[in-house]
Image (cartoon, helix red, strand yellow):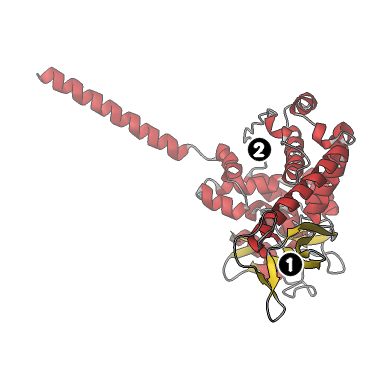
């Protein structure tokens, strides 16, 4: 007999004084546990199988239903015993490492994400709490530690990671509460005032690129909004010249092609300038098959992102442009797109998980149309006032 809901077995073992119910189950680490539940209200049938005895069970005897309930109670009690033992000796550092392994093996986190978490561990969390018993980490201690951070995205990020680790511990019974949830977050406000190149400056940058391929990279970043890793991962099968579109399927990160940052494939309109640049490099003699990268190194592999950033910086210097990060090319795309398309469209093109991220580009939207609307409203207001005044004079 087996209680399928609990992945545990009921066993009937014949003893000197009659049949006895036992429960058997396995722990997550494969350890098998067996516990006596009590005398079974059973008897042998003519065929030799165990069947329920007639009449009401005598005191202390268990029916099959009773045995399932008792098995559930015994397992809960055993689980709580293990949890108490873990609470007594598990440090925050132990739990943090468990959480990271769980993310890698069970949740399939990207290598870049795991690396980010490891940096947060090593730089902030483990020096502060690594040797502290996880069940002794309270909100007051976290509040004092977090209060030492300046108001920044880093402060927001480390508290988020800490809360995720304690949430993991709470679900496993290693702590009685997630103390990080009681800590007041540092509000981080984004002005949306990105520093970015104008259209004229983008044209100069593309003109002064060291190669035709670099010119195509800069144009695709600035006029299609692809991230650097998405540019490196782009393959010819993702470029749809007939459909005037680029399909962003991958992101090159730490030597691997993974899904884009949002986790979803997206389609971006391909404007004629970008199509022309890509078509020109598509005339090269080699590395133009569907699965070949669009932007290649000397042997047809993915280009080196660090070297690309250096060539970009050199092109900025040759063009006499103020130094801005490579990512500012993507910001240029967002600032232009938000002037011609809806916020929802721009969100889809840029692959933002949250529309609040896209809304930061509204700062760059031209106010000419809105100003015209307001001018018309004020003009109508003045006409109405004059009409009222004229009506009063006539009376």
Q: Which residue position holds label 1?
A: 281
**Nearer-the-camera pick, 312 or 37:** 37
Q: Vertically, is 386 above or below 160?
A: above
For the residue labelled by badge 1, is the local secondary structure a helix, a strand or a loop? Answer: helix
Could you tell me how far apart the alpha carbons at marks 1 and 2 are, in whole angstroms?
31 Å
In the picture, the disc for residue 194 is 2
Label located before the other in sequence (1 or 2): 2
Q: Vertically, is 311 above or below 386?
A: below
Q: Position of residue 268 (x, y in %)?
A: 60, 59
Q: Residue at x 9, y 18 (%)?
A: 395
Label 1, residues with CA under 10 Å away: few <14, some 14-19, many ≥20: some
Q: Residue at x 78, y 62 (%)?
A: 24
For the residue labelled by badge 2, is the local secondary structure a helix, a strand or a loop? Answer: loop
Quarter of the rendering containing residue 104: bottom right
Hey, which residue is sitting farthest bottom in the picture? 47
Q: Position of residue 315 (x, y in %)?
A: 79, 48
Q: Position of residue 370 (x, y in %)?
A: 44, 37
**Nearer-the-camera pick, 162 or 303:** 162
Q: Is 347 displayed left or right of 259 in the figure? A: left
Q: Vertically, is 367 above or below 186?
A: below
């Amino acid at each position: 007999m087996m209680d399928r809901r609990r992945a545990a077995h009921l066993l009937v073992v014949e003893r000197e004084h009659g049949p006895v119910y036992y429960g058997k189950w396995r722990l997550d680490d494969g350890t098998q546990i067996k516990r006596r539940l009590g005398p079974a209200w059973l008897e042998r049938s003519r065929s030799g199988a165990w069947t329920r005895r007639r009449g009401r069970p005598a005191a202390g005897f268990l029916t099959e239903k009773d045995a399932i309930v008792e098995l559930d109670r015994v397992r809960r009690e055993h689980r709580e015993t293990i949890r108490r033992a873990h609470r007594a000796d598990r440090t925050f550092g132990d739990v943090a490492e468990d959480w990271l392994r769980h993310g890698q093996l069970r949740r399939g986190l990207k290598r870049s994400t795991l690396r980010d978490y490891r940096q947060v561990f090593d730089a902030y969390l483990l020096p502060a709490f690594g040797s502290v018993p996880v069940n002794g980490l309270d909100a007051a201690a976290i509040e004092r530690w977090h209060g030492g951070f300046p108001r920044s995205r880093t402060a927001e990020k480390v508290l988020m990671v800490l809360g995720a680790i304690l949430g993991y511990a709470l679900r496993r019974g290693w702590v009685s509460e997630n103390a990080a949830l009681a800590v007041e977050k540092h509000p981080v406000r984004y002005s949306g005032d990105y520093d970015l190149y104008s259209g004229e400056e983008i044209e100069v940058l593309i003109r002064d690129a060291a190669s035709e391929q670099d010119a195509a990279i800069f144009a695709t970043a600035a006029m299609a909004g692809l991230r650097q890793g998405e540019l490196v991962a782009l393959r010819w099968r993702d470029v749809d010249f007939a459909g005037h579109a680029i399909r962003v399927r991958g992101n090159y990160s730490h030597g691997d092609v993974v899904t884009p940052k949002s986790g979803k494939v997206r389609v971006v309109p391909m404007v004629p300038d970008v199509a022309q640049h890509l078509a020109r490099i598509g005339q090269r003699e080699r590395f133009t098959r569907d699965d070949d990268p669009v932007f290649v190194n000397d042997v047809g592999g993915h280009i080196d992102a660090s070297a690309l950033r250096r060539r970009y910086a050199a092109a900025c210097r040759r063009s006499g442009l103020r130094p801005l990060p490579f990512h500012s090319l993507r910001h240029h795309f967002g600032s232009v797109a938000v002037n011609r398309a809806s916020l929802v469209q721009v969100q889809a093109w840029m692959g933002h998980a949250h529309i609040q991220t896209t809304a930061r580009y509204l700062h760059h939207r031209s106010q000419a149309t809105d100003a015209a609307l307001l001018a018309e409203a004020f003009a109508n207001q003045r006409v109405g006032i004059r009409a009222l005044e004229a009506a009063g004079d006539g009376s």
